[in-house]
Image: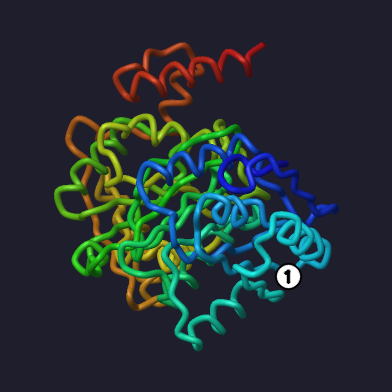
Amino acid sequence: MRVIAGSAKGRRLKTAGGRGTRPTADRVKEAIFSMLDSRVDLTGAQVLDLFAGSGALGIEALSRGAAGVTFVEEGRDALRALRTNLAACGFAAQVRVLAMPVTAALRRLTQAGTAFDGVLLDPPYEKGQVAATLAALAAAAIVRPGGWVVVEHHLDEAPVHPAFSDLTPTHRYGKTGVTVLHVPEEPADRAMQRKAVYPGSFDPITNGHLDIVRRALDVFDQVVVAVAYNANKDAALFSPAERVELIRESLADVGDRIIADSFEGLLVDYCDRVGGTVVIRGLRAVSDFETEFQMALMNRHLNSRIETFFMTASEAYFYTASRLVKEVAALGGDVSALVPPGVHARLQAKIKARQR
């Protein structure tokens, strides 16, 4: 691992041993700073590096002209490597190292009135870490208006929070995604109030689902299409990551008004994490309503801020359900009119693989 550009270009960096750290690959780091270079000016910037590890991202920012970096890391081995790297690069006088958990560091920085121009965020690949850290960062309000947040994340975890908007689409590197978020100059209150979550198994997503999503965009500013799954019980045809990918591909023309994500656990907790206040539920028949109504009341009981928005299926899709699509396709029936072309191709491949 090395410094890629700037005053410390070529300097080799030590990495921390053990399973607790996951150093950013050089190619991913180079991509991160290429995205930043075309959008923000690092010269003179104050940067916060959360889950800093051995400091590769923050040191790269310093090498490229950042005035100062605050590193937050609690791992003993990582801290030792971080301090060694800072001394070797000659940056010790420009930094502050907070040896503590991220949540404690954010509280301290808030109390001190510290503000940053940008944040480098590379949490461990554990479900919920990205969303929880973005929520804590938003609550701390320590990123200046117009600032930026770089999030390195697993592709299964979309970096979503109403306090931030996408400055770039997610770039993919294997199972790693990199997204640059933007802190608006003024709070987007209206957009925050009109973010809805459309949950479901989406195994796979059908044209009926897409019809609901596209019509929902006439009502809401942004819709999070959330794949619900249980890792212990999920016997779906497509994995959660595959379903998220198919949703993104099927709605690529919509841009950042659609976010595809996956979650485990209570829907109301997920809505809180992503800033959604409305749950969208599709109804194909009158018989659906009783079950959906009970679920809506339970969600309201668990979180009184969550409302449910019922949408009836268009007449062309009354009979379209993921379960039926899979059953018909497995028996050799033509379902090409019921799912997007990309989904149809992947569905046929999955079924053929299972029948071998």
Q: Is residue 42 left or right of residue 238?
A: left
Which residue is painted at 70% across and 58% down in the image?
Answer: 53
Asked which colour scheme the image uses, the reply is rainbow
Q: Position of residue 41 (x, y in %)?
A: 38, 52
Placement of the N terminus among the 4 image quadrants: top right
Q: Report the front residue among 253 and 304.
A: 253
Count of marks placed on residues: 1
Q: Is residue 129 visible?
A: yes
215 above or below 321? below
Whether residue 302 is visible:
no
Task: Classify 112 as above or below 229.
Answer: below
The vertical placement of 31 against 222, above or below, is above
- Tell me if 13 is positioned left or right of 77 in this view: left
Instruction: Identify which residue, 323 or 261, lies in the foreground.
Output: 261
Query: What is the x, y in percent for residue 189?
Result: 22, 69
Q: Is residue 57 left or right of residue 99?
A: left
Camera-side residue: 159 or 5?
A: 5
Image location of residue 84, percent across then percent down: 79, 60
177 left or right, relative to 181: right
- In the image, what residue occupies the spot 33% across and 55% down? 165
Assess disc 1: are there few (<14), some (14-19) or many (≥20) residues with their C-alpha within 10 Å of its C-alpha: some
Viewer-proximal residue among 148 and 129: 148
Q: Position of residue 145 (x, y in %)?
A: 31, 68
Which residue, given by chain and number where applicable, does mark 1 sit on? 74
- Quadrant placement of the C terminus: top right
In terms of secondary structure, where does tag 1 sit?
Answer: loop
Which residue corresponds to the image point at 26% horizontal and 32% vertical from the top-left? 253
Amino acid type of the residue that numbered disc 1 sits on in the rendered structure:
Glu
**Residue located 21% across and 54% down the image:** 221
Depicted 65 relative to depicted 204: above or below: below
